[in-house]
Image (tube, rainbow, N blue to C red):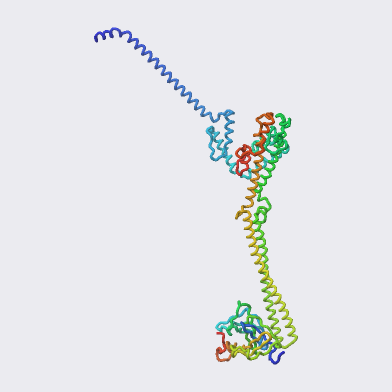
Amino acid sequence: MNMNLGTRGALTFRLGDFSFAVRVEEAGGVLDAERLAHLPCVAESVAGVAAFRGEMVPVVDLAVYLGIETQGLPGPRYALVLTRGVDRFALLIPEIPKLVLGRDLREAPASAVDPELGELFESELETDQDHFHCLNYWKIFESMIPPSGAAGPGRSSTERGN
Amino acid sequence: MLGRREDDRGGSAGPSAVLVTFATAVLAGAAGIILAGLAAWVWVGAITFGGAYLASRTSRGVKAESPLKARRLLLMLDRGGSQEAKAPVEFTEEWGTLYERLNKMALEARTSSTALAELERFRQQANLAASILRDGKDPLTEAPELRVGPLQSLLEGIKSAASTPVVSRLPLGEEELIGTDGEGLPPTWPKPTGESSPRGPAIAEGVARGLRNLVQDLEALGATLGGEGRRPTTPGGENPDLRSPAQLVDAVVLTAADGIEDLAAGLMRANELASVAERVTNRATLLALNAALEATRSGSEAFAAIAEETRRLAEFAREATDTISRLASEIEYKVGETITAIHATSEHAKTSLAEMSGAATPLPASARSARAQIGKLLDRARELQRALNTPSSDRVGGDPMAGPNSVQEHVENDPPPADKLPAEGILLIEGLKPGARLES
């Protein structure tokens, strides 16, 4: 375990030409997203809601939000659930994420950071074959669905879905 | 002069005028009597002839015809059987009605009977005649029904040929070649008229053999034209023995295509099951991932070990599912290629067969078979006709003892021209045509 990395591992997935990673401490689980309940009057990047262990979880289409074009026919989709305390939301991804243990990960140098990600970028992990972007996913979610008690809905300047 | 003449007249007119008057009265009475008698005789004759005419008219219906006239009229009745046939002038009253009735019956019998029925009747008669000939007996004597059939002339010719010394055109034996190279004939040949000729039984045997062949060919023709339904057929009702090569190619292609289509249907079902297995594998993979995620988060090594086993199981299921899907796709692709190749090969085979047969659309097999059998039948009939023609045309002027040279001059090996076919041969050939009237 690489304790210097601050994580036991990460769930990695590809979205278009980019690779992303979610630390296992933030991940609550992965579920099948073939059946999503669509919500009316919501942002386009909100794909709907899914049931995860008896609770309703909003699902955010990360590709739509980031403006990443995914090639190929629409196939099976999966929802990667992120947890923070009692709050949960899910990222809609086109493939089953891979679990990369912390011993195989290391922090990437700062020069490798993609400048387009801006404020959403949190860190970057890499292995011997690939490197992954770790984003502030909760910031993306709160930009679309602000937490209760916040001052009205609004999208931050980092919203790139439209 | 005038006064003297009047005097002359007055002096000589007294007794002659009375005589003339008396004679005239007598002649007038006689003429009246004669005319009255003649008129009476005319009336009597007219009444007599009228009565006789009326008597003949009223008695004609019940009057019996003479035996000779009745026989002649009965013979004329047999000329019926045509729709355009009218009653001859010899027929009146009941004879005309009878003629019309018989003509109608003959016409109905002719139009209602099919060619196959006639062929079957002819075949039975020929078979009967052949069996009697094999026994060395006379068919006309043994079977009375043959005296009125189409084989009557044929059998009479056989009978006459068997009792008359002849020189046949057929290669009946070595004795036929005697004398052809200039050598003298044996002194005992030809045999006297009173003895039975050795060629008679030979001709009869030849005719019997020809009849047997004729019977066999007729049976084959009847089976081809009307007996197809009695032959063993495929479940689709088609006789496999009568299919053309192109139809056989089509049948093979259809059979192979059916089998391959069944295989393709099985592959589709396998693909469906593979997709189900893939979904199960995805579930297992998600389960293994969630277990590994929880184990990683908790840091429990035991939980991590179980999660690792679950992950391996999910990977194994994934590999198996991928292998099944890949094999199914390969088999499906090869099946498609095979179907295409089979269709291309069948088209090529049919084209080649059409080129070999010289026709783009070959005739039906049954039509070709029937045509070939009819051709063979006519050949047999002509051969039989030649065998029968020899005794009637090659007889040596009624005197077989005229000399060896005169006999040798009539030895011929060439067949007669077609326009000189005898009546028996024409009857036989005409009788074999479909729809021909076989009654004599």
* Quadrant position of the N terminus of chain A in the picture: bottom right
Report if residue B5 is visible in the image.
yes
Q: Quadrant of residue B356?
A: bottom right
Q: Nearer the viewer, residue B201 or B136?
A: B201
* Quadrant position of the C terminus of chain A in the picture: bottom right
Query: Residue at the top extreme?
Result: B11
Residue that appears at 66% across and 83% down = A97
Residue A24, position as x, y percentages in the image: 68, 87
Residue B85, position as x, y percentages in the image: 54, 38
| Left or right placement of residue A17 versus residue A103 in this view | left
Residue B174, position as x, y percentages in the image: 73, 37
Q: Nearer the viewer, residue B101 or A101?
A: A101
Q: Quadrant of residue B401?
A: top right
Residue B11, position as x, y percentages in the image: 28, 7
Residue that appears at 63% across and 48% down = B371
- In the displayed structure, A125 sits above or below B194; it is below
Q: Quadrant of residue B246?
A: bottom right
Report if residue B159 is visible in the image.
no
| Left or right placement of residue B172 versus residue B25 in this view | right
- In the displayed structure, B305 sits above or below B353; it is below
- In the displayed structure, B202 sits above or below A83; it is above
